[in-house]
Image (cartoon, helix red, strand yellow):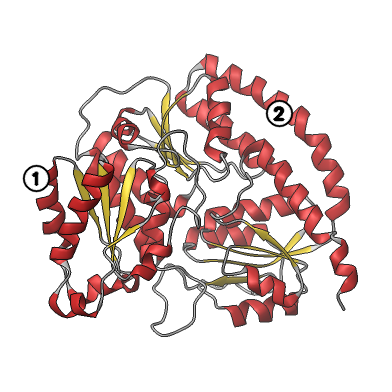
Protein backbone atom coordinates (compact mmCIF):
# COMPACT_ATOMS: atom_id res chain seq x y z
CA UNK A 1 0.00 0.00 0.00
CA UNK A 2 1.18 3.52 -0.77
CA UNK A 3 1.61 5.36 2.56
CA UNK A 4 2.11 9.07 3.08
CA UNK A 5 5.52 10.25 4.35
CA UNK A 6 7.04 6.76 4.08
CA UNK A 7 9.62 5.50 1.61
CA UNK A 8 7.99 3.41 -1.13
CA UNK A 9 8.24 -0.35 -0.61
CA UNK A 10 10.01 -2.48 -3.20
CA UNK A 11 7.27 -4.85 -4.30
CA UNK A 12 8.15 -8.53 -4.68
CA UNK A 13 7.28 -9.45 -8.27
CA UNK A 14 8.29 -11.43 -11.37
CA UNK A 15 8.76 -14.59 -9.27
CA UNK A 16 7.11 -17.99 -9.36
CA UNK A 17 4.03 -18.53 -7.21
CA UNK A 18 4.43 -20.52 -3.99
CA UNK A 19 3.80 -24.20 -4.68
CA UNK A 20 0.41 -25.31 -3.37
CA UNK A 21 -0.86 -21.78 -2.81
CA UNK A 22 -4.04 -20.50 -4.46
CA UNK A 23 -3.18 -17.85 -7.06
CA UNK A 24 -5.00 -15.66 -9.58
CA UNK A 25 -2.13 -16.33 -11.97
CA UNK A 26 -2.44 -18.46 -15.09
CA UNK A 27 0.07 -21.25 -15.83
CA UNK A 28 3.00 -21.58 -18.27
CA UNK A 29 0.89 -23.49 -20.80
CA UNK A 30 -1.74 -20.71 -20.74
CA UNK A 31 0.95 -18.09 -21.46
CA UNK A 32 2.19 -20.05 -24.47
CA UNK A 33 -1.34 -20.44 -25.85
CA UNK A 34 -1.98 -16.70 -25.43
CA UNK A 35 0.99 -15.98 -27.71
CA UNK A 36 0.55 -18.72 -30.31
CA UNK A 37 -3.16 -19.48 -30.52
CA UNK A 38 -4.02 -16.49 -32.81
CA UNK A 39 -1.75 -17.87 -35.60
CA UNK A 40 -4.69 -18.71 -37.78
CA UNK A 41 -3.43 -21.40 -40.19
CA UNK A 42 -1.45 -23.30 -37.55
CA UNK A 43 -2.54 -26.59 -36.03
CA UNK A 44 -2.29 -26.48 -32.22
CA UNK A 45 -1.68 -29.95 -30.77
CA UNK A 46 -1.74 -30.31 -26.99
CA UNK A 47 0.37 -33.20 -25.73
CA UNK A 48 -1.31 -33.98 -22.43
CA UNK A 49 -4.61 -34.89 -20.77
CA UNK A 50 -7.78 -33.90 -22.61
CA UNK A 51 -8.59 -31.23 -20.01
CA UNK A 52 -5.75 -28.97 -21.18
CA UNK A 53 -7.29 -28.97 -24.67
CA UNK A 54 -10.30 -27.09 -23.30
CA UNK A 55 -8.23 -24.00 -24.02
CA UNK A 56 -9.67 -23.14 -27.45
CA UNK A 57 -10.63 -20.21 -29.63
CA UNK A 58 -13.87 -20.00 -27.63
CA UNK A 59 -11.81 -18.93 -24.61
CA UNK A 60 -9.58 -16.52 -26.53
CA UNK A 61 -11.67 -14.87 -29.21
CA UNK A 62 -9.04 -13.63 -31.68
CA UNK A 63 -10.47 -12.96 -35.13
CA UNK A 64 -9.14 -14.17 -38.48
CA UNK A 65 -9.41 -12.72 -41.98
CA UNK A 66 -8.72 -16.10 -43.59
CA UNK A 67 -8.05 -19.56 -42.12
CA UNK A 68 -10.20 -20.85 -39.26
CA UNK A 69 -7.98 -23.84 -38.39
CA UNK A 70 -6.78 -22.17 -35.18
CA UNK A 71 -10.30 -22.31 -33.74
CA UNK A 72 -9.81 -26.04 -33.12
CA UNK A 73 -7.83 -27.59 -30.28
CA UNK A 74 -6.23 -31.00 -30.80
CA UNK A 75 -5.00 -33.32 -28.04
CA UNK A 76 -3.10 -36.59 -27.62
CA UNK A 77 -5.47 -37.31 -24.70
CA UNK A 78 -2.82 -38.92 -22.47
CA UNK A 79 -4.15 -41.62 -20.11
CA UNK A 80 -2.65 -43.57 -17.18
CA UNK A 81 -1.12 -46.17 -19.51
CA UNK A 82 0.66 -43.44 -21.51
CA UNK A 83 1.99 -41.86 -18.34
CA UNK A 84 3.46 -45.18 -17.21
CA UNK A 85 4.93 -46.26 -20.56
CA UNK A 86 5.49 -42.85 -22.20
CA UNK A 87 3.51 -40.89 -24.77
CA UNK A 88 6.03 -40.32 -27.57
CA UNK A 89 4.57 -42.93 -29.97
CA UNK A 90 1.10 -41.55 -29.37
CA UNK A 91 2.33 -38.03 -30.11
CA UNK A 92 4.08 -39.08 -33.33
CA UNK A 93 0.93 -40.85 -34.50
CA UNK A 94 -1.25 -37.83 -33.61
CA UNK A 95 0.97 -35.46 -35.63
CA UNK A 96 0.72 -37.65 -38.74
CA UNK A 97 -3.04 -38.14 -38.33
CA UNK A 98 -3.62 -34.39 -37.91
CA UNK A 99 -1.45 -33.56 -40.93
CA UNK A 100 -3.24 -36.04 -43.20
CA UNK A 101 -6.61 -34.58 -42.19
CA UNK A 102 -5.85 -30.82 -42.29
CA UNK A 103 -2.53 -30.34 -44.19
CA UNK A 104 -1.34 -27.35 -42.08
CA UNK A 105 1.87 -25.46 -42.90
CA UNK A 106 2.95 -25.48 -39.27
CA UNK A 107 2.09 -27.54 -36.19
CA UNK A 108 2.76 -26.35 -32.64
CA UNK A 109 3.12 -29.17 -30.09
CA UNK A 110 2.52 -28.01 -26.52
CA UNK A 111 4.12 -29.89 -23.61
CA UNK A 112 1.81 -29.85 -20.55
CA UNK A 113 2.45 -30.68 -16.87
CA UNK A 114 2.17 -34.45 -17.37
CA UNK A 115 4.72 -34.40 -20.19
CA UNK A 116 7.08 -32.39 -18.01
CA UNK A 117 6.84 -35.09 -15.32
CA UNK A 118 7.21 -38.21 -17.50
CA UNK A 119 9.91 -36.60 -19.69
CA UNK A 120 8.72 -37.32 -23.23
CA UNK A 121 11.30 -36.07 -25.75
CA UNK A 122 9.01 -33.85 -27.81
CA UNK A 123 12.02 -32.20 -29.50
CA UNK A 124 12.96 -35.51 -31.12
CA UNK A 125 9.38 -36.38 -32.03
CA UNK A 126 8.84 -32.96 -33.67
CA UNK A 127 12.15 -33.15 -35.56
CA UNK A 128 11.31 -36.60 -36.92
CA UNK A 129 7.85 -35.37 -37.93
CA UNK A 130 9.37 -32.41 -39.80
CA UNK A 131 11.63 -34.74 -41.77
CA UNK A 132 8.78 -37.12 -42.52
CA UNK A 133 6.08 -34.57 -43.44
CA UNK A 134 8.14 -31.70 -44.88
CA UNK A 135 6.42 -29.00 -42.79
CA UNK A 136 7.43 -27.11 -39.63
CA UNK A 137 6.55 -29.02 -36.44
CA UNK A 138 7.64 -26.94 -33.47
CA UNK A 139 7.83 -27.98 -29.81
CA UNK A 140 6.52 -25.53 -27.20
CA UNK A 141 8.12 -26.20 -23.80
CA UNK A 142 5.19 -25.24 -21.58
CA UNK A 143 4.62 -27.65 -18.64
CA UNK A 144 2.27 -25.64 -16.44
CA UNK A 145 4.24 -26.06 -13.23
CA UNK A 146 7.64 -25.05 -14.64
CA UNK A 147 7.34 -21.31 -14.00
CA UNK A 148 4.62 -18.70 -14.35
CA UNK A 149 2.58 -17.19 -17.16
CA UNK A 150 5.54 -15.04 -18.24
CA UNK A 151 7.56 -18.26 -18.77
CA UNK A 152 4.80 -19.40 -21.12
CA UNK A 153 5.04 -16.17 -23.10
CA UNK A 154 8.75 -16.86 -23.54
CA UNK A 155 8.10 -20.45 -24.66
CA UNK A 156 5.65 -19.21 -27.29
CA UNK A 157 8.08 -16.53 -28.49
CA UNK A 158 10.86 -19.11 -28.80
CA UNK A 159 8.64 -21.20 -31.07
CA UNK A 160 8.03 -18.13 -33.27
CA UNK A 161 11.76 -17.44 -33.41
CA UNK A 162 12.38 -21.00 -34.55
CA UNK A 163 9.82 -20.46 -37.29
CA UNK A 164 11.34 -17.15 -38.49
CA UNK A 165 14.92 -18.39 -38.51
CA UNK A 166 18.13 -17.31 -36.84
CA UNK A 167 19.24 -14.62 -39.32
CA UNK A 168 17.77 -12.03 -41.65
CA UNK A 169 17.58 -13.40 -45.21
CA UNK A 170 15.87 -10.52 -47.11
CA UNK A 171 16.20 -6.71 -47.23
CA UNK A 172 14.28 -4.34 -44.97
CA UNK A 173 11.07 -2.85 -46.38
CA UNK A 174 11.05 0.97 -45.88
CA UNK A 175 8.34 2.50 -43.62
CA UNK A 176 7.22 -0.96 -42.51
CA UNK A 177 6.54 -2.17 -38.97
CA UNK A 178 5.55 -5.26 -37.05
CA UNK A 179 2.93 -4.84 -34.34
CA UNK A 180 3.81 -7.10 -31.39
CA UNK A 181 1.47 -7.97 -28.54
CA UNK A 182 -1.93 -7.56 -30.17
CA UNK A 183 -4.09 -10.66 -30.51
CA UNK A 184 -6.88 -9.14 -32.64
CA UNK A 185 -9.53 -9.50 -29.96
CA UNK A 186 -12.77 -8.07 -31.34
CA UNK A 187 -10.85 -6.79 -34.41
CA UNK A 188 -8.53 -4.51 -32.39
CA UNK A 189 -5.55 -5.19 -34.68
CA UNK A 190 -7.68 -4.20 -37.66
CA UNK A 191 -8.56 -0.89 -35.96
CA UNK A 192 -4.87 -0.09 -35.48
CA UNK A 193 -4.11 -1.25 -39.02
CA UNK A 194 -6.63 1.27 -40.37
CA UNK A 195 -4.76 4.08 -38.56
CA UNK A 196 -1.42 2.89 -39.93
CA UNK A 197 -2.81 2.70 -43.46
CA UNK A 198 -4.00 6.31 -43.18
CA UNK A 199 -0.57 7.33 -41.89
CA UNK A 200 1.16 5.63 -44.84
CA UNK A 201 2.83 2.98 -42.68
CA UNK A 202 3.01 -0.58 -44.00
CA UNK A 203 2.01 -3.12 -41.37
CA UNK A 204 3.94 -6.30 -42.20
CA UNK A 205 2.92 -8.65 -39.39
CA UNK A 206 0.80 -8.56 -36.26
CA UNK A 207 2.25 -10.89 -33.67
CA UNK A 208 0.19 -12.77 -33.33
CA UNK A 209 -3.35 -11.56 -34.00
CA UNK A 210 -4.65 -12.63 -37.42
CA UNK A 211 -1.15 -13.78 -38.37
CA UNK A 212 -0.30 -16.83 -40.44
CA UNK A 213 2.70 -18.86 -41.53
CA UNK A 214 3.58 -16.62 -44.48
CA UNK A 215 3.21 -13.32 -42.61
CA UNK A 216 5.44 -14.54 -39.78
CA UNK A 217 8.18 -15.32 -42.29
CA UNK A 218 7.92 -11.71 -43.53
CA UNK A 219 8.37 -10.20 -40.07
CA UNK A 220 12.21 -10.03 -40.13
CA UNK A 221 11.98 -7.54 -43.05
CA UNK A 222 10.33 -4.79 -40.96
CA UNK A 223 12.04 -1.45 -40.28
CA UNK A 224 10.59 -1.14 -36.77
CA UNK A 225 8.88 -3.28 -34.12
CA UNK A 226 6.28 -1.72 -31.83
CA UNK A 227 5.21 -3.61 -28.70
CA UNK A 228 1.78 -3.21 -27.11
CA UNK A 229 1.65 -6.16 -24.69
CA UNK A 230 5.06 -5.71 -23.07
CA UNK A 231 4.73 -8.75 -20.80
CA UNK A 232 4.27 -11.21 -23.63
CA UNK A 233 6.33 -9.67 -26.44
CA UNK A 234 9.24 -7.60 -25.11
CA UNK A 235 11.35 -10.77 -25.06
CA UNK A 236 10.56 -11.45 -28.74
CA UNK A 237 11.29 -7.82 -29.68
CA UNK A 238 14.71 -8.03 -28.01
CA UNK A 239 15.50 -11.30 -29.78
CA UNK A 240 14.44 -9.84 -33.16
CA UNK A 241 16.61 -6.77 -32.52
CA UNK A 242 19.57 -9.07 -31.94
CA UNK A 243 18.91 -11.45 -34.86
CA UNK A 244 17.51 -9.08 -37.50
CA UNK A 245 18.68 -5.61 -36.30
CA UNK A 246 15.08 -4.37 -35.95
CA UNK A 247 14.82 -1.65 -33.26
CA UNK A 248 11.72 -1.64 -31.04
CA UNK A 249 9.76 0.61 -28.74
CA UNK A 250 6.76 0.13 -26.48
CA UNK A 251 3.39 1.71 -27.23
CA UNK A 252 -0.11 1.56 -25.74
CA UNK A 253 -3.33 1.89 -27.73
CA UNK A 254 -5.59 1.78 -24.65
CA UNK A 255 -7.20 5.19 -24.08
CA UNK A 256 -7.19 8.38 -26.13
CA UNK A 257 -4.02 9.91 -24.69
CA UNK A 258 -2.05 6.68 -25.05
CA UNK A 259 -3.30 6.16 -28.62
CA UNK A 260 -2.26 9.68 -29.64
CA UNK A 261 1.14 9.18 -28.02
CA UNK A 262 1.59 5.80 -29.76
CA UNK A 263 0.77 7.11 -33.22
CA UNK A 264 3.15 10.06 -32.84
CA UNK A 265 5.89 7.76 -31.53
CA UNK A 266 5.59 5.45 -34.57
CA UNK A 267 5.65 8.37 -37.02
CA UNK A 268 8.68 9.99 -35.36
CA UNK A 269 10.60 6.72 -35.10
CA UNK A 270 10.17 6.09 -38.83
CA UNK A 271 11.22 9.70 -39.45
CA UNK A 272 9.31 10.11 -42.71
CA UNK A 273 8.01 13.72 -42.98
CA UNK A 274 5.01 12.70 -45.06
CA UNK A 275 4.02 10.10 -42.46
CA UNK A 276 4.36 12.65 -39.64
CA UNK A 277 2.05 15.11 -41.46
CA UNK A 278 -0.52 12.39 -42.20
CA UNK A 279 -0.39 11.26 -38.57
CA UNK A 280 -1.16 14.73 -37.19
CA UNK A 281 -4.14 15.04 -39.54
CA UNK A 282 -5.43 11.64 -38.39
CA UNK A 283 -5.06 12.59 -34.72
CA UNK A 284 -6.83 15.93 -35.20
CA UNK A 285 -9.77 14.28 -36.93
CA UNK A 286 -10.10 11.49 -34.38
CA UNK A 287 -9.90 13.83 -31.37
CA UNK A 288 -12.70 15.92 -32.82
CA UNK A 289 -14.81 12.78 -33.10
CA UNK A 290 -14.23 11.36 -29.61
CA UNK A 291 -13.72 14.24 -27.16
CA UNK A 292 -17.35 15.37 -26.97
CA UNK A 293 -18.54 11.78 -26.56
CA UNK A 294 -16.09 11.11 -23.73
CA UNK A 295 -17.12 14.34 -21.98
CA UNK A 296 -20.68 13.04 -21.77
CA UNK A 297 -19.60 9.76 -20.17
CA UNK A 298 -17.17 11.54 -17.81
CA UNK A 299 -20.04 13.49 -16.25
CA UNK A 300 -21.93 10.25 -15.53
CA UNK A 301 -19.11 8.13 -14.03
CA UNK A 302 -16.91 10.69 -12.24
CA UNK A 303 -16.29 10.03 -8.54
CA UNK A 304 -16.50 6.22 -8.53
CA UNK A 305 -13.63 4.00 -7.32
CA UNK A 306 -11.99 1.22 -9.36
CA UNK A 307 -10.11 -2.01 -8.60
CA UNK A 308 -7.96 -3.55 -11.35
CA UNK A 309 -6.46 -7.04 -11.59
CA UNK A 310 -5.08 -7.90 -15.04
CA UNK A 311 -2.31 -9.95 -16.61
CA UNK A 312 0.37 -7.42 -17.44
CA UNK A 313 1.72 -4.25 -15.87
CA UNK A 314 1.64 -2.37 -19.16
CA UNK A 315 -2.12 -2.88 -19.47
CA UNK A 316 -2.62 -1.94 -15.81
CA UNK A 317 -0.84 1.38 -16.38
CA UNK A 318 -3.04 2.18 -19.38
CA UNK A 319 -6.19 1.36 -17.37
CA UNK A 320 -5.19 3.65 -14.50
CA UNK A 321 -4.73 6.48 -17.01
CA UNK A 322 -8.10 5.76 -18.61
CA UNK A 323 -9.84 5.82 -15.22
CA UNK A 324 -8.02 9.02 -14.26
CA UNK A 325 -9.23 10.56 -17.52
CA UNK A 326 -12.81 9.64 -16.58
CA UNK A 327 -12.47 11.09 -13.08
CA UNK A 328 -12.30 7.67 -11.38
CA UNK A 329 -9.66 6.85 -8.74
CA UNK A 330 -8.00 3.43 -8.80
CA UNK A 331 -7.90 2.20 -5.20
CA UNK A 332 -6.71 -1.41 -5.75
CA UNK A 333 -4.35 -2.46 -8.55
CA UNK A 334 -2.62 -5.78 -9.24
CA UNK A 335 -1.11 -7.87 -12.03
CA UNK A 336 -0.03 -11.43 -12.81
CA UNK A 337 3.25 -10.64 -14.57
CA UNK A 338 4.20 -7.03 -13.78
CA UNK A 339 7.87 -6.19 -13.28
CA UNK A 340 9.60 -3.71 -10.98
CA UNK A 341 9.69 -0.89 -13.56
CA UNK A 342 5.97 -1.24 -14.24
CA UNK A 343 5.11 -1.22 -10.54
CA UNK A 344 7.13 1.99 -10.12
CA UNK A 345 5.04 3.56 -12.88
CA UNK A 346 1.83 2.29 -11.24
CA UNK A 347 2.92 3.85 -7.94
CA UNK A 348 3.57 7.20 -9.64
CA UNK A 349 0.08 7.24 -11.22
CA UNK A 350 -1.94 6.34 -8.11
CA UNK A 351 -2.76 8.21 -4.92
CA UNK A 352 -1.55 7.60 -1.37
CA UNK A 353 -3.42 4.67 0.15
CA UNK A 354 -3.78 2.71 -3.10
CA UNK A 355 -3.28 -1.04 -2.57
CA UNK A 356 -0.77 -2.49 -5.07
CA UNK A 357 -0.69 -6.31 -5.42
CA UNK A 358 1.39 -8.92 -7.24
CA UNK A 359 0.44 -12.63 -7.54
CA UNK A 360 -2.59 -12.28 -5.29
CA UNK A 361 -5.47 -14.67 -4.56
CA UNK A 362 -9.28 -14.28 -4.40
CA UNK A 363 -9.38 -13.80 -0.61
CA UNK A 364 -6.85 -10.97 -0.72
CA UNK A 365 -8.61 -9.30 -3.63
CA UNK A 366 -11.94 -9.52 -1.83
CA UNK A 367 -10.48 -8.11 1.38
CA UNK A 368 -8.93 -5.06 -0.26
CA UNK A 369 -11.88 -4.39 -2.61
CA UNK A 370 -14.20 -4.21 0.41
CA UNK A 371 -11.72 -2.28 2.55
CA UNK A 372 -11.13 0.38 -0.12
CA UNK A 373 -14.79 0.58 -1.21
CA UNK A 374 -14.28 -0.10 -4.91
CA UNK A 375 -17.40 0.25 -7.08
CA UNK A 376 -16.05 -1.57 -10.11
CA UNK A 377 -13.57 -4.40 -10.77
CA UNK A 378 -11.68 -4.76 -14.05
CA UNK A 379 -10.28 -8.24 -14.66
CA UNK A 380 -10.75 -11.48 -16.56
CA UNK A 381 -12.54 -14.77 -16.33
CA UNK A 382 -11.14 -15.59 -12.87
CA UNK A 383 -12.13 -12.23 -11.38
CA UNK A 384 -15.67 -12.12 -12.78
CA UNK A 385 -17.25 -14.44 -10.14
CA UNK A 386 -15.64 -12.40 -7.36
CA UNK A 387 -17.23 -9.18 -8.61
CA UNK A 388 -20.63 -10.87 -8.89
CA UNK A 389 -20.26 -12.33 -5.40
CA UNK A 390 -19.41 -8.93 -3.93
CA UNK A 391 -22.22 -7.20 -5.83
CA UNK A 392 -20.02 -4.68 -7.61
CA UNK A 393 -19.75 -3.71 -11.26
CA UNK A 394 -17.41 -5.71 -13.52
CA UNK A 395 -15.59 -5.03 -16.79
CA UNK A 396 -14.00 -7.86 -18.76
CA UNK A 397 -10.59 -6.79 -20.06
CA UNK A 398 -9.32 -10.28 -20.86
CA UNK A 399 -8.96 -12.24 -24.09
CA UNK A 400 -12.44 -13.75 -24.06
CA UNK A 401 -14.20 -10.40 -24.52
CA UNK A 402 -16.05 -9.66 -27.75
CA UNK A 403 -15.80 -5.85 -27.78
CA UNK A 404 -12.82 -3.73 -28.85
CA UNK A 405 -11.08 -1.61 -26.22
CA UNK A 406 -8.11 -0.37 -28.30
CA UNK A 407 -7.72 2.88 -30.18
CA UNK A 408 -10.11 5.84 -30.25
CA UNK A 409 -13.09 3.56 -30.86
CA UNK A 410 -12.04 1.37 -27.93
CA UNK A 411 -11.77 4.38 -25.60
CA UNK A 412 -15.43 5.20 -26.29
CA UNK A 413 -16.43 1.55 -25.84
CA UNK A 414 -14.63 1.47 -22.48
CA UNK A 415 -16.27 4.68 -21.21
CA UNK A 416 -19.66 3.43 -22.36
CA UNK A 417 -19.15 0.11 -20.57
CA UNK A 418 -18.09 1.84 -17.35
CA UNK A 419 -21.24 3.98 -17.50
CA UNK A 420 -23.56 1.06 -18.25
CA UNK A 421 -22.02 -1.03 -15.49
CA UNK A 422 -21.72 1.38 -12.56
CA UNK A 423 -25.02 3.13 -13.34
CA UNK A 424 -27.04 -0.01 -14.00
CA UNK A 425 -30.52 0.00 -12.39
CA UNK A 426 -29.74 -3.43 -10.94
CA UNK A 427 -27.80 -1.82 -8.07
CA UNK A 428 -31.08 -0.27 -6.82
CA UNK A 429 -32.32 -3.78 -6.03
CA UNK A 430 -29.29 -4.85 -3.98
CA UNK A 431 -28.83 -4.07 -0.30
Q: Which mark is residue 344?
A: none
* Other residues around mark 2 within 10 Å, as few (<14) / some (14–19) / many (≥20): some
Q: Secondary structure at mark 1?
A: helix
Which residue position holds label 2?
Answer: 286
Q: Residue at x 37, y 56 (%)?
A: 73
Name the residue furthest top: 274
Give whichever of 220, 35 is nearer the camera.
35
Q: Residue at x 21, y 45 (%)?
A: 100
For residue 83, side relative to residue 300 (left or right): left
Q: Could you say where residue 404 lies in the image, as x and y percent from the top left?
A: 62, 44
Q: Secondary structure at mark 2?
A: helix
Query: Cα distance, mark 2 to mark 1?
Result: 52 Å
Q: Quadrant of the N terminus?
A: bottom right
User: Looking at the image, can residue 252 be seen?
Assistant: yes
Task: Give the answer, above or below, for where 388 lies relative to 177.
Answer: below
Q: Residue at x 52, y 61 (%)?
A: 311
Q: Quadrant of residue 310?
A: bottom right
Q: Could you say where residue 125 lies in the image, as x and y percent from the top left?
A: 13, 57
Task: Give the answer, above or below, for where 339 lies relative to 369.
Answer: above
In this view, the mark in front (2 or 1): 1
Q: Quadrant of residue 80?
A: bottom left
* Other residues around mark 1 within 10 Å, as few (<14) / some (14–19) / many (≥20): few
Give whichever of 263, 394 is nearer the camera.
394
Q: Could you say where residue 230 lies in the image, as x and y percent from the top left?
A: 46, 50
Task: Give the answer, above or below, for where 48 lies relative to 396.
Answer: below
Give whichever of 180, 184 is nearer the camera.
184
Q: Could you say where residue 22 lies in the image, as x and y percent from the top left?
A: 49, 81
Q: Are dots 2 and 1 in contact, CB under 8 Å?
A: no
For residue 197, side relative to residue 34 (left or right): right
Name the residue furthest front: 101
Which residue position holds label 1?
Answer: 131
Amino acid sequence: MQKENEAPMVISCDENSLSGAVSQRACVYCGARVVLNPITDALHLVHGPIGCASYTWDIRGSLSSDSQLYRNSFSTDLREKDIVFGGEKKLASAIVEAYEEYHPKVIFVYATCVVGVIGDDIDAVCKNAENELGIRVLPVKSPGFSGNKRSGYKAGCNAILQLMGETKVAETIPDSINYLGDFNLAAEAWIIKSYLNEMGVKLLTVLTGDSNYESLLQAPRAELNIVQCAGSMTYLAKQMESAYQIPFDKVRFLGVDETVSALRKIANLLGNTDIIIRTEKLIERKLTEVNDVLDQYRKKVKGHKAAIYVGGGFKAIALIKQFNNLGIDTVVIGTQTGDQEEYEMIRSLTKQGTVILDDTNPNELQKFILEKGADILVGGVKERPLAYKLGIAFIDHNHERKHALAGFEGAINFAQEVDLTVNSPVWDYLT
